[in-house]
Image (cartoon, rainbow, N blue to C red):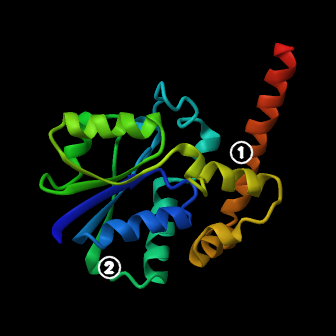
């Protein structure tokens, strides 16, 4: 077992596949750093492999709200606070990453698509240690944040896709309403653009 591990994600919304990823990494290290990407609007920009990831509808929750979601889920899954930290992780500005993470940590990744491949190359180009936990085609990814946001916007069931603490946090703080509102706006804009292109 290594001493220090690092994972990262947007966590918009934090779901059970995220938890699976975190637990798999935690099993391999004594202390885990959980990096939140797109921590604020200044550190958010598009990738040629994921042009929608910087959209407001794809980033409805603030850094603090995601921090709270993750912390609640870690408590729910009985991970001691002494075993992890939650930090900003500016993946879109890789030149700043090492200002936020331990230099001797191992970055754990899951590879599903070209954006994941791009991130892997970014981290390796910085001379960082990267371990791939799994590599699968995108069709096998399962739960995604965009799927959950779509379910919220269309009043479909989504509680079974997230930790219980996350569902409680989002609904008690009415954050599901914000997520639904922004996602509906995105859907409406998409429909309008389709009509214009016909």
Residue 29, disc = none
Of label 1 and label 2, which has the lower sequence position? Answer: 2
Above or below for 56 versus 28: above
Query: Residue 49 in the image: x percent, y percent?
Result: 49, 29
Quadrant location of the C terminus in the rendered image: top right
Residue at point 64%, 75% (across, down): 168
Mark 1–mark 2 CB contact (< 8 Å)? no
The mark total stands at 2
Q: Residue at x 60, y 56 (%)?
A: 142
- Expressed as whole percent of the image width and height from the top left, the position of residue 51 reads 55, 29
At horizontal 55% and vertical 52% (from top left) the residue drawn is 141
List x then y, in percent, for residue 47.
46, 29
> Which x, y percent locates residue 42?
42, 36
Query: Which image quadrant for residue 55?
Result: top right
Q: Secondary structure at mark 2?
A: helix
The answer to which image quadrant residue 174 occupies is: bottom right
Foreground of the two, 103 or 129: 129
Indicate whether 46 appears above or below 198: below
Residue bearing mark 1: 182
Q: Residue furthest left?
A: 104
- Quadrant of res 38: top left
Number of residues whose C-alpha sits closer than 10 Å to that of mark 2, classed few (under 14), some (14–19) or many (20 or more): few
Residue 81's label in the rendered image is: 2
Secondary structure beneath label 1: helix
Q: Residues within 10 Å of mark 1 (few under 14, many from 20)?
A: many
Taking depth in this image into account, of 89 and 143 the one nearest to the observer is: 143
The N terminus appears in which quarter of the rendering?
bottom left
Q: Residue at x 15, y 69 (%)?
A: 3
Cα–Cα gap, marks 1 and 2: 33 Å
Observer-nearest of 76 and 161: 161
């Amino acid at each position: 077992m290594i001493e220090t591990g690092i994972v990262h994600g947007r966590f918009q919304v934090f779901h059970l596949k995220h938890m699976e990823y975190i637990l798999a990494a935690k099993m391999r290290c004594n202390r885990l750093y959980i990096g939140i990407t797109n921590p604020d609007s200044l550190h958010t920009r598009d990738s040629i492999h994921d042009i929608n990831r910087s959209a407001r509808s794809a980033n409805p929750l603030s850094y603090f709200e995601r921090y709270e979601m993750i912390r609640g889920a870690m408590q729910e899954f009985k991970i001691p606070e002494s075993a992890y930290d939650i930090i900003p992780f500016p993946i879109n500005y890789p030149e700043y990453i090492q200002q936020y993470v331990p230099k001797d940590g191992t970055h754990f990744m899951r590879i599903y698509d070209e954006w994941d491949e791009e991130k892997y190359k970014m981290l390796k180009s910085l001379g960082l240690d990267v371990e791939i936990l799994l590599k699968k085609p995108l069709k096998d990814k399962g739960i995604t944040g965009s799927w959950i946001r779509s379910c919220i916007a269309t009043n479909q069931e989504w509680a079974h896709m997230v930790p219980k603490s996350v569902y409680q946090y989002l609904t008690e703080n009415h954050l599901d309403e914000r997520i639904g509102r922004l996602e509906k706006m995105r859907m409406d804009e998409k429909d309008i653009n389709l009509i214009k292109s016909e």
